[in-house]
Each structure stands twice: as structure tokens, then as C-alpha cells.
Amino acid sequence: MEALKMENITKIYPNGFVANKGITFSVQEGEIHALVGENGAGKTTLMKVLFGMEQPQEGRIYVEGKQVKITSPLDAIAKGVGMVHQHFMLVPSMTVAQNVTLGIEPRKHGLVDNEACVKMTQQLSDKYQFGLDATATVSELSVGLMQKVEILKALARGAKVLILDEPTAVLTPQETKELFEQLKLLKKSGHSVIFISHKLEEVMELCDNVTILRHGYCNGSYPISELDERKLSRLMVGRDVILKIEKPDPKPGKPVLEVKNLEKLSDEGKVVLDHISFTIREGEVLGIAGVEGNGQNYLSDCISGMQKYDGGDVLLNGKSISGRRISDIRRSGMSHIPEDRMTVGCVSTMSIMDNVMADRFDRPENMKGIFLDQQKAIAQTDALIKEFEISCDDRSEEIRLLSGGNIQKVVVAREFTSGANFVLANQPTRGVDVGTAEMIRKYLVRQVREKQIASLLISADLNEVLEVSDRLLVIRQGKIVAAFSKASMVSEDELGEYMLGIKTMTPDEMEGLL
Amino acid sequence: MNKTKRIENTFDVVRILIAILLAYLIALIILALISDDPWNVISLFIIGPFNSKKHVGDIFTLMIPLVFTGLCMCYVYAINKFNLAGEGAVNLGGCLAACVAIALRDTAVPGWIAIILCIIVGALAGMLSTAIPAIADQVFHADVCVISLMLNYILLYFTTYILKNVIKDQGASVTASYKLGRKVKLANLIPGTQIHIGLLIALACVVFVAILFYKMPFGYKMRAVGVNPSFARYIGIPVGSTIILSQVIGGAFAGMGGSVQILGMFPRYKWESLTGYGFDGLMIAVLARKNPVLVPLSAFLIAYIRTGASLVATKTQIPPEFVSIIQGIIIVLVAAEMFLSGWKKRLIFSAAKKSLKEKEAKA
Amino acid sequence: MSALRIGSFLYSVLRLSTPLIFAALSAAICEKAGLFNMAAESMMLWGALIGVMVNGWTGSVWLGFLGGCCAGVVTGLLIALATVKGKADLMLAQIAINLASGGGTIFMLYVVTGDKSTSAMTIKSQSLPKIALPFLKNVPIIGRMLNNQNLLTYGAILAAILLMIFIKRSRTGVHIRAVGENPNAAESVGISVSRTYFLTWAISGLLGGIGGVFMSMGYTSAFTKNMVAGRGYIGLCASSMVRGNPIGAMLCAMVFGVSDAIANQLQLTNAPVDLVMMLPYAVTIIVLIIISVIKIRTHVRKIKNKASQVV
């Protein structure tokens, strides 16, 4: 029987971004249904629609054959849809039982009946063999157990359909195995599970059916038995637009950035960068491809000096950046296009001029004695607005009033003209329009070639890494798992297989390519 | 300028004016209700400050310390740290300046040097006052607001201790220090009023702060840190030291305010309670929207309200403290984003629709 | 020191701690909801003034008590209104309310009585009764300490215990804690965050208001201007020492009560009065800094522990 059906769902965000276009998919009772697709393919949006966090422009949702309207998460819960978010919605200082029963606490004499809470939670945990201690405090639990608490929370509220958003991203292999056992058990008891994942071997192992999303469209639903990993990967990754950037062959000069055995532990103590080494030379772009959340942001933060690293070293122009201030690192040749342009890359309530001049207002050439040289700042800003075709009223316009693409142009304009010989570009074209993205990519390539600077491009967009990079590395779970000397010779299928963990190169194979 | 921005700017000014008017209206209603002679009281409150040369002079005289503390709070508010030690800094600055004046009174040191020394000591005292909460906050992550409020009491009792035990003139009939001496008295600027050259010093400070805010690297750093610390860090601005330094510089102005007030207005030092200038300063900074150039204007406004209130107080016994109710209402209304926000949205929305229509018409 | 003197010293500690305990509890419930309560100062001032006024009008000390409570609650709700509905900055709104309350209470006192500094001459108000506990009479030290305290002193201890039960065991209390730690989690299971904030401010106001009533109808028997004198902030400090645990906040408030009591004792000697008056505030600052340092240390240690577990 059909537990749930989403029909012809279209979701357009206020800024005009089409996240879902006419998507239809259905989940049977007692099945585990995988929802796969690249970043930005529309999986999260679709699930937000299902869970009542976003309202679609078009489309219908049916639960057990009846058409329903889901307007809020509470509504979704009432209709038997539960969701386990990637960021857990737990209260750390409370016990498992308190978390599971939050908002639906049984009461006795006007007070919360803790015993009943514990009993109810423990029964539920035992029924599905979760092995949780209902009286344990959540903050003391491992991530894997916290996730089980989340699942119990949904079950305690009577969820028949469970959405799991990349549940294995935070789990160890053992925990993953355990989770799969439990999901299979849930399936047996008649629950349906929507399993969102990048990891193909997991999808193959666990799921019954799979729906593939690509660029907001549905790319078909298939029974797993009809697919193999290779075929699935091709359905997921494939490219629609081939962007060609003409570029002469690189003439690599002396090394600019050397990363040696870099190690980093996250605040939670997880190894997020695992002995990463590579070198970037003058006049070349090194691309790092990978599914998001595999350590790219830690890598970017460690190289730019925003975070300290726990082992190994990063040398910029022959000098270690360890323990140095960011202003110092920038002076010695670093420029950095951050992933998050709104909170890190700019000050949204200051003018274009203030943003463009942010890293250079106090350089001697921009000063008149002890004062800022207004004239020079104006001249430089106007020149950059013209060169980068930033559409705005004038240089005094506040950044927040610009479009996303134009904001990114301001950031790019500043970072490319800072006089640095190394540009760290982390997702430089995410969320910007096609035209601006193309302009930024071409500009990056031209600068590297003409000025013989070095660049590290971190991107989850395969088009981008393949077109822009000279050499290419693939990162997975904080490790470099593949290296290619010529990015233009790599096919997207092959890249996809390394990114998704179907293949891994041995250290010998990568020797000399790092 | 961008249309949306223009609407927002106009809207901000209108909003502040409406907040002030509303608060005033409430005050007037209260005054009218409690007074036997409401028209007289209200006219005293509103027109009184302008009805004689002396009263206008009073507004400007009161403006002097308020400009100083307003500048202090501009710094504090610009980096989003509610360090209120500026209040105690006024007392400490005044007290220590008085000590210096008394020590130099019977020496051969010329008056202008003595005055400069007094003001410098006042500034240093102010810097020390705001530095303590600033450092406690940045280094130990103790809440800057609570520490500064506690510190105000400590500074108050410390200065009263000095007053009663170090510089007290036993011959005086009330608790007061020795005479500060004629040579440190700040010269009168306009005869017939109490306006002294402290006003010029205050305005000079406004110019200096405006230059520092908008024309010098440190001002830029400060504004960036205040609005978006993670950006500031990313671009290479030393966030922690900028935060501490701005508070310390701000404190200098509060301390100067205290010393200038003592030298300009009083023959002896006799503060035994907090002056309230520091808290007024926060309000001035809020009204001036952290812009030092607007500080004299909003200081004038507060001075006008306070002068009106004290006129009411002398004629009718109504305590001038009712002004603090007006101030509280104004701050809350200006701080509350939602206050009149529906109206703003409608304005922006209709402007956007209009420009869309224009574009369509062109096409 | 004789047992008697120790006993009477402890008696005054308890007496001086009472308003601090209420202030600390008022801050504690806010802390549990993830809010920073600097406005206990205002709640107490209004509680103190309105309590005396209602008492004077009605002649009933109990109605006065009730009036003081209501005044505190209204103050709390005003903050909620400005910050939750009006989206004003919490710090700025509380500073404004404290500013307005300092002057506002004086103004109201004048409006009602014509006096600008105290209600002692003009309003006939009583104190809440002291309670004799005869069975303690002959117990050394403890007897002297606990016997004959004001009703609200026992009330403070009781309030701490009740608040503890409320936070730990009542449904609303659990919801307040959930909102305080993870508003998203609370919202996702249907707990209204803004309603919870309003409720928290109301309870906080109630506790602050009672603290104020004690100031004017227990500690003294009249309202005097600025009589709260930073006790709200000291309470806040006590609560943040123990992260809002009510019983802990009460004990910490008593520690500050000790410094108050010592200051009081020293004033009787010929130590300089003003320096002695600094003592409670100085102790607060130092304690606040020490707690902050400890908090950082334990945080760092936790991260390190977790890291080493994984490795």
C-alpha cells in the first residue's frame, strides 16, 4: 500500500531559484526508499516541503491515499511524518526519556511523571532494539546514540513515515551498520523510511527503491535490483551544460603553497583532516572535488589561518603560517574567497567602498599621513565596480541591497586585487547566477595564467572543478582519495566514483601527483 | 542613492522623531494629570528652557558633559558592548581632577597647564574605569555590562571616600572638598550665562572623534568589528584588541567630561552620588545612531528635556526624575525593530511595485 | 567570638541575603530559559514601591504584598513585550527599563506622597510579620540564626525549593529548560518559544517583585529611593555562578549576604564607611571573573576529553 505520495511538486524560492520542478515520487508502506542526488539537486527542499517547513507553489501530497495539506512541522507530525534532521533537535542536558517525551509528557498530580516517561521511552527503545538507556543524559551520548534518540522521538509521536537526512554522515562504520539493522526492523513493523544519502554502497545495501533528483528535476525512480553502483552514479552526477574555458597549458613555477601532513580534529573530537599533503605552484589551479562536508571547510579554514591545525604544517611562500595573525598571513600573499559570503565575506551594512577597501584601507599607499585617502579609495572602488561590472547605484550603496551575484563580485574583486600570489577560492560560485559564475571562473583562470599566481579551488560543483582546475584532487572523509595530473582528462563518471567512494587510489598511485 | 536605502533612512529619522514625540506626549499627560496648574507646568517644561538667556545658557551648559559621555557611549555602542562604566568614569574623572587642582592650587604652575593636567588626569581615570570591564569581558568572558554596573558603585564609593578622607575641607558647612582655586576655573564664554570654554573642548572632541571614526584606520576597524566580528577576523583586523581599545578610548571622553564639568561649574568638588551623565550618554549614542557627528544634536535634545524638567522642579516641586521615564520609553521604542516596521515594509513594497511598473512601461 | 555573636551574625546574614535570594531566583529562571536578566533591579524597585503604596491605601499588609508581586510581574511582562514582540535588543531594553524605573519610582512616590526620597513619613505601611519558632529557641547558634526571621526570609528558602521543583518536574519548567537550551528543538515539538519567554519573564518578575516587597516591608518598613542599590545585579551574579540552579543560586546569594553582613559589621567599627560599602560590589566582580575563568577551563577540558576519547 502507498504510504505517501508527492505529486508534481514545484518549489520556487523568492529569489527566483527553482529548487524543485514537477517532482513526483511515492513511498510504499514498509519500504526503505532512497532519495539521492548531488548537492543542490533539491533533496533537502523536497523534504522540507514534505515536513511542512516550506510551502510549494504547485503539487499535492497524499498520505495513505488521502490528499493532505501540510503547513507546519507539527502538522506533519500529526499526519504521521517524522524527520531526523542532520543537526539534531535535542536538549543536551536532559535525559533520553525527557527528550523523547518533550511536549507530550505524561503527568501525575500536575507534575511530569518521570517514571512514566522513562517507562514509555524504554519500552519503545526495547521494542525496536535501540539499546538506549532512557535515563542517560543526552550530552553524554555518542553521536550515534543521539541519532537513535531522534528516531525514537519521531516514533513516540506516532510517525509512520520517517525522513532521515544524510543520517550516516556523522556515524562511524559500526554505528552505520547498527542503524541499518534498526531501520530494517522498522521496515518489518510496517514503517516507511525515506533515506537521503550520497553514499551509493549504503543505498545499494539498505534500500528497496531509489528516486534520483538532478538540478531540481526528478531523474526517475528505480527498484534497486535494477541498478548497480556505476549506473546509479551516472544517473546522479551527469553534466547538462558543458562549459568550456579556453586556457593555455600551465607553466608551473616554484611552489607557493605547501600543505604537509595536515591534521585537524573537530571540536567534537572527530578527525576531519587526515594527513593531507599537496603542493600548488605558480601559474596553476589545483582543484579539490568532493561531496560537501568531507573536510573541505576545515581545509579552507586551516590554510587561511581562521582555525588552528592539530598536526602537520602549511607553508605559504616558504614560511609556515602556524601561530601567525591573519593580517600577517594575508600580507605574505594569501587571499581568500570564503564559502559563506554573507557572514564572513562582507559586512552587509557597510558600503561597497568600505567592503572593497577592507583589506587595504590602512596600507601606506592608501593613506595620506595618518588619514585614509578618500580620493584613492573612491578611484579604486569605481575602477573595480567597472571592471567587475558590479551593478549598483553607486559606491556608497550598502552591500545588503545588492543581489547575491553582485555581492560575490565585490568579494571576488577585493580578493583578486589584493596583490596576493595565492588565491584560496572556497565555493566561489555557489548560489550565484550562471553569468556571474562564468565570469568569476574565467577571471580566475586568466589571473592565474597572466600573473603566474597559484590558486586552490574547492568546489562541490563538478563542472567547475573540471573546467577551471589544472590538476585535481578528490577529498573524502578528510582524506585525499584520488589525484589527477590533468583535470581536463578526467570524466565526470570517474570523478563521481571517487567522490562517492566506489573507488579509491592507493598512495602509490597518487605518488608525484600531489 | 538607492531607493530602498532612502526609504529606510527617512524612515529611521521619522521613527526616532515619533518615538520622542510619543514619549513627550506621555510625559505631558502625566504632568497635566498631577499638576494643579497643568498649562503653566507644561509651558514651563516645553517653552521654559527658551524663555530667557540664562535658561538657554543652561541647556548649553548641561550639554557639555552630555556630549562627552555621548561620545564615550558611541564607542561602546559602535562595537556592541554595553560597557556602562562611563557613568562611574565621570565621577572618578571629576574627583581626581579636583585632587590635581587642589594639589596645584598654591603652586607656581600656571593656570592653563594646571587645567590641561586636570583634564588629562580625568581622561586617564576614565580610561582606567572602562578598561576594567573591557578586559574582564575580552580576557575572561565575564559579562561586560554587569561588571561595569558593579564597578560604578565601586567608583562612587571610592570617590566619596577620597572626598571625605583626603580632600575634605573641614571648614565647609557641607561635605565638600577644598576650593579648587580660581586659576583652574574654565573661563566663561558668554556673559550672563554659565557657558564655559568646556563647550569648545567638547565640540573639538566631537570633531576629533568624527575624524577618528570616518577618516582614520582605527575607526574603520571599529565599525567593522561592531557590525560583523567574523568578517573583521577574516579580513585580518585584530578583533579583541580593537574591542578593548575602543572602550578605553571611549572611557577617556567620559573621564574628561567629569573633569571639565568640575572645573567649569563648581568651586569645590562635592559629588556624593552618580551623576547620571553616563546613562544619558548611552541614550544620546542610541539617538545619534552611533554617529559622533550627531552627538551634539542629541545631547542638546536631552539637555533641553532635562533643563525643562529642572525648571518644572524648581517651580513646582515635581521631581526632575520623570525625565528618566521619557528616556526609557524613547530607548525602548528606538531599539524595538518591530515598532512601526509594518509601515516601513509597506513603503518599501509600494516603491518596489512602482519601479517595476516604470520598467514595464519603458519596455 | 561567642556563640551568641556568631548566631546574631548569621541571623543578619540570612536577613541580608533574603532580597539577594529573590533576585538570584528571578535571574535563575531566566537563565534556564536562556535569557539574561539584568532587570531584577527594576522588578524589585517597583515591587518595593507598589507594595508600600497598596499597603498604605488598604491598610492590609497582605494586599500590599500582592500589589508588590503584581508590580514585579508587570515589569517582567514589559520586558517580554519589548524584546519578544517588539524585537528590541535585550540588553538595551533592560538598561532602558532600569533607567526608567530608577526615576519612575521616585516620580511616582512624589505623585502619591509629595515626598521625593522616602515614604516613611507619608505612607502608613507595616512590615510583614516575623515568625517565632519557639522550638528553636534553645538550640545554640541555629536558634539565634533562624528564629524570629521575617516571613519572607523563610519564604525565600521555600521559593528556592519550589522553583527547583517547578523547573525540574513541572511540564512548563521542562519546556522552559528546553527553550533555553535549544529553541529549535522546542519549536519542532510544538512548544511556543515566545509564549515560554513571556511566562518566564512573568515568573521572574513575580520573584523580583517579592524581593522588592521584602526591601520595603521587611528589611525596612518604608520605601526609600534607589533602595535596591545593585542587589538585582548581585542576584544575577549569584545565579550565573551555578548556571541558574535555584538551590545553588540561593546558597550563592547567601555568600554575598555574608559580604553584606561583614560590611554592616565593619560600619560599626571605625573602618572608613565608603571603602566598606565597596566590599559587596568588589566581591561580586571578583567572583564573576573567577566563575567565567572556571567556565572557560571546563569547556576546554570537555573538548579535550572528547577528543582523546575518539583518538
Image (spheres, helix red, strand yellow):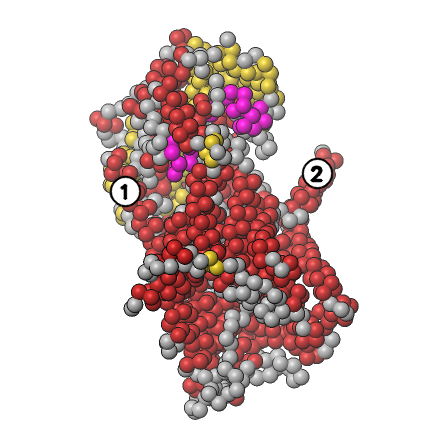
The picture places residue B146, in percent across and down from the top left corner, at 45, 58
Provide the residue designation for mark 2: B353
Residue type highlighted by circle 1: Lys
Determine which residue is flagged by label 1: C304
Task: Give the foreground label among 1 and 2.
Answer: 1
Q: Which residues are magenta?
A: A70-98
Q: Do marks 1 and 2 both belong to one polypeptide chain?
A: no
Q: Residue sitting at 62 percent across and 66 percent down?
A: C123
Q: Is residue A390 above or below residue B289?
A: above
- The residue lying toward the viewer, choosing from A413 and B23, is B23
Q: Is residue B284 above or below residue A261?
A: below
Q: Is residue C29 left or right of residue B18?
A: left
Query: Is residue A134 covered in magenta?
Result: no
- Closest to the observer, B177 or C199: C199
Q: CA distance from mark 1 to mark 2?
A: 56 Å
Q: Residue at x 48, y 21 (%)?
A: A158
Q: Tell me the crowding category of disc 2: few under 14, some 14 to 19, or many 20 or more residues within 10 angstroms, Cα based.
A: few
Rendered image quadrant of residue B359: top right
Residue lying at 60% horizontally and 83% vertically, measured from the top left: B188
The chain identifier of the residue carrying mark 2 reads: B
- Tell me the residue at 65%/84% (across/down): B191
Tell me the quarter of the image containing the C terminus of chain B: top right
